[in-house]
């Protein structure tokens, strides 16, 4: 199976190039990055530095004539344009898939711009390029047109231990806006607040309990990564209503704190706890994370 990865010199593109190579696929990466050749040599795969968005239709057809699977792994902002250019060039019996964090727009574009005989698979790997393997990693599948290549991709992911879940594109974006977009928003707000307060994070780490150190690590983890990616996630999900709800909750809680209204604060927390559901399991699972943090700290002191 020959796979062409558009954006293959990027973090996730390179990750999947390595993954498919290790699973005996013939892999080619296409990217305009200056690092494309170096990445290709490191992975021992073929490469092209052609600019897909500037290629003529006939040249695109020729470029993909021997490709079974085209995987789109480019920034969210240009995903639609890339699909729009590439889709019509794909031959029947091939498969077009993406690994974009949002799904409604890319999936709709893939369906609109390809022939009926082209298989379509939207995916969202819920991990980053630092993941060591696919084992235990959750991946959302949004299959639109299934066929033999889809079955091969599904089987490959399953054999490598992926936790595959199926959603429609609409369901995906609604859920991810809350479980991905909202935590990002909260943690970035935390980081920006630290900056606005001119708070000395490194000094404060000496006084943090392990739970707060873990939270601070996640703030730093997000700040360490690509700000463009996270800005695109915020602006491509339908976040307005979610932001409004969060800000209303934060404002309400702030007002109760200012009033010193302990009973009302307790009431809000108790209602949130009832809605949350199984807080006992959350407590046990987070205890394990905290324990790991404590053990890591002890090892560093030895």
Image (tube, grey):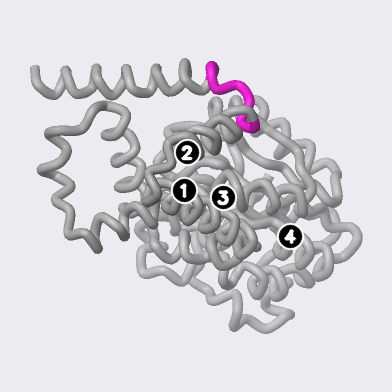
| Pick the front one: 209 or 250 | 250
Say which label, 1 or 3, has the lower sequence index. Answer: 3
Q: Is residue 127 magenta?
A: no
Say which label, 3 or 2, has the lower sequence index. Answer: 3
Identify the magenta region: 275-281
Q: Which mark, residue 253?
A: 1
Q: Quadrant of the C terminus?
A: top left
Pair 4/3: label in front? 4
Pair 1/4: label in front? 1
Say which label, 1 or 4, has the lower sequence index. Answer: 4
Question: At which x and y percent is residue 31?
Answer: 49, 66
Give the SS element for disc 4: helix
Residue 100 relative to residue 258: left or right: right
Give the SS element for disc 1: helix
Residue 163 relative to residue 230: left or right: right
Give the SS element for disc 3: strand
Q: Residue at x 85, y 45 (%)?
A: 146
Residue on which the image places disc 3: 27
Q: Are marks 2 and 1 in contact (CB under 8 Å)?
A: yes
Question: At which x and y percent is residue 126?
Answer: 56, 41
Residue on which the image places disc 4: 104
């Amino acid at each position: 199976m020959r796979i062409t990865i558009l954006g293959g010199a990027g973090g996730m593109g390179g990750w999947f190039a390595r993954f498919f190579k290790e699973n005996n696929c013939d892999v080619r990466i296409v990217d305009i990055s200056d690092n494309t050749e170096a990445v290709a040599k490191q992975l021992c795969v073929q490469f092209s530095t052609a600019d897909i968005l500037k290629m003529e239709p006939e040249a695109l057809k020729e470029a993909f004539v021997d490709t079974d699977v085209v995987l789109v792994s480019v920034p969210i902002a240009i995903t639609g344009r890339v699909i729009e250019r590439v889709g019509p060039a794909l031959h029947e019996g091939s498969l077009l898939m993406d690994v974009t964090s949002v799904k409604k727009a890319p999936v709709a574009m893939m369906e609109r711009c390809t022939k009926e005989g082209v298989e379509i698979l939207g995916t969202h790997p819920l991990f980053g390029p630092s993941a060591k393997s696919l084992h235990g990693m959750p991946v959302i599948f949004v299959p639109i047109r299934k066929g033999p290549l889809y079955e091969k991709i599904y089987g490959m992911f399953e054999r490598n231990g992926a936790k595959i879940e199926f959603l429609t594109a609409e369901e995906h974006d609604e859920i991810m806006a809350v479980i991905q977009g909202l935590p990002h928003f909260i943690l970035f707000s935390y980081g920006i607040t630290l900056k606005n307060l001119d708070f000395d994070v490194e000094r404060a780490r000496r006084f943090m309990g392990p739970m707060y150190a873990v939270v601070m690590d996640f703030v730093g983890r997000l700040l360490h990564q690509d700000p463009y990616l996270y800005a695109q996630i915020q602006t491509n999900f339908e976040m307005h209503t979610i932001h409004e709800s969060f800000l209303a909750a934060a404002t309400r809680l702030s007002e109760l704190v200012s009033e010193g209204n302990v009973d009302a604060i307790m009431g809000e927390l108790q209602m949130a706890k009832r809605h949350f559901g199984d807080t006992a399991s959350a407590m046990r699972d987070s205890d394990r994370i905290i324990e790991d943090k404590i053990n890591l700290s002890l090892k560093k002191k030895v």
